[in-house]
Amino acid sequence: MTLLAAITNSAAAGAGAGTPAHPIVLTPGAAPPPPTSSALPTPIPPTAWSLAPADPALPKAASFLASSLASCSTLPRLRTLLASFLATLSQSLSLPPPPPALPAAIRALAPYFPTAIASLVASKAASLAEHDVLLALAESRLLRHPPADLISSLSDIDRADLVCAVLRQAADLRSSEILAALRFFLSPASEKAYDATMVVKGRWKDAAVLAVNKCGEKGAGKKKKVDAAARQAAMLLMMGHDGFSSPEVCLHYLFASGNVDSVVLGAAVAELDGGEVVRLMRYLNKWIGKYQRFPEAQAFPEAAGTLGFEQCESLPSFGAVARALGVVLDNHFSHLVLNADVREELIAAEGMVRELAAEAESSGPILDLLRRLQQDK
């Protein structure tokens, strides 16, 4: 406030209520009088913002579990530690008692399970071959940041189902983890490893058949919406199943992840040998052909919640496939061009990509017009 404004306000107040409470003193260098009240609220002390846990036993139990996992060397000890922590977690949050089976208890308490401890538990469970607990952690989406050596260790024991479960919900993947998954699925080391991938593909087939059966269900009202969703899910599931080998179906989980950075993927792809590069290029080329044949295919992650088809979350989008193909060509262009076995496939892939790009470019103005019409409503 300027001095003139202060004098004006003071004069107006004095005229209405007699002598002002703080008269203006016109003395050179004198400080203005302090205000009678402050518009700011009283500061809240920092200690008032801290929130104490509902039960002090919970942080103690979490700390004890984290410290005890380092020295845990037997499976019974791991199960005892986990059961004790889950019981304390349930009691501290006033939840129903957890089921006696550890995998079921983890799934029941997944929304409250600390993710930092989940990574430690997963690492120890993998080292002690407690795969049911590890699968429960992965399927409950508690391994957004999996341990560094988890995927490679699971690949060494040919557990394709667990590798796919971890890849499906991982928020960030290192190049070493991507490389381990690529080599495991592009070059299965044994018949046991290949058989494990066949189990994963079998689940895709069962889901696709179930979706096709749902398409035949008739009814009124909500049933019609369910049938339309089932038809869309059936198309996506058949796209991911037909024409792909069992190891290639497992690759869907890697390339469907939206968190695979092109730079990190490039570092992993650069380490592949010639045969693995050719197989990866052919896998990506199959997806290009699928999207050319079914241009109406769109991502449908809601099918996992509404229809129970979790595989619909794990289909690579056309953008993800195109980016991955570009990464492969950038890192191994000379090898692919000089390889007579894949030269024709490269030419075919180039033609399909050009057609899809031209179609997307031509439909761009129409999509813009539709958006504007929707906004004008």
Image (tube, rainbow, N blue to C red):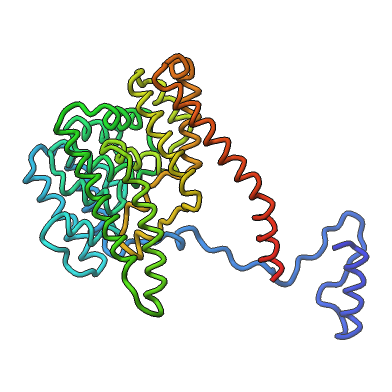
Q: Is residue 70 visible?
A: no
Tally the marks.
0
Q: Quadrant of residue 30?
A: bottom right
In x, y percent, where is residue 293?
46, 45
Residue at the (37%, 24%) spot, across then down? 278
Residue at the (93%, 65%) spot, across then down? 4
Along the line of sight, which residue is nearer the eye, 371 or 214? Answer: 214
In x, y percent, where is residue 177?
33, 32
Say which quadrant the C terminus sits in. Answer: bottom right
Residue at the (50%, 49%) spot, across then down? 295
State left or right for residue 240 relative to residue 155.
right
Residue at the (44%, 19%) spot, across then down? 336
In x, y percent, where is residue 190?
16, 28
Along the line of sight, which residue is nearer the eye, 77 or 259? Answer: 259
Say which quadrant the N terminus sits in. Answer: bottom right
Q: Quadrant of residue 340?
A: top left
Along the line of sight, which residue is nearer the eye, 29 or 57? Answer: 57
Along the line of sight, which residue is nearer the eye, 345 or 222? Answer: 345
State left or right for residue 29 relative to residue 348.
right
Q: Is residue 224 visible?
A: yes
* Residue 132 higher or lower than 308, as above or below: above
In x, y percent, where is residue 268?
39, 26
* Residue 293 higher or lower than 371, as above or below: above
State left or right for residue 41 relative to residue 205.
right
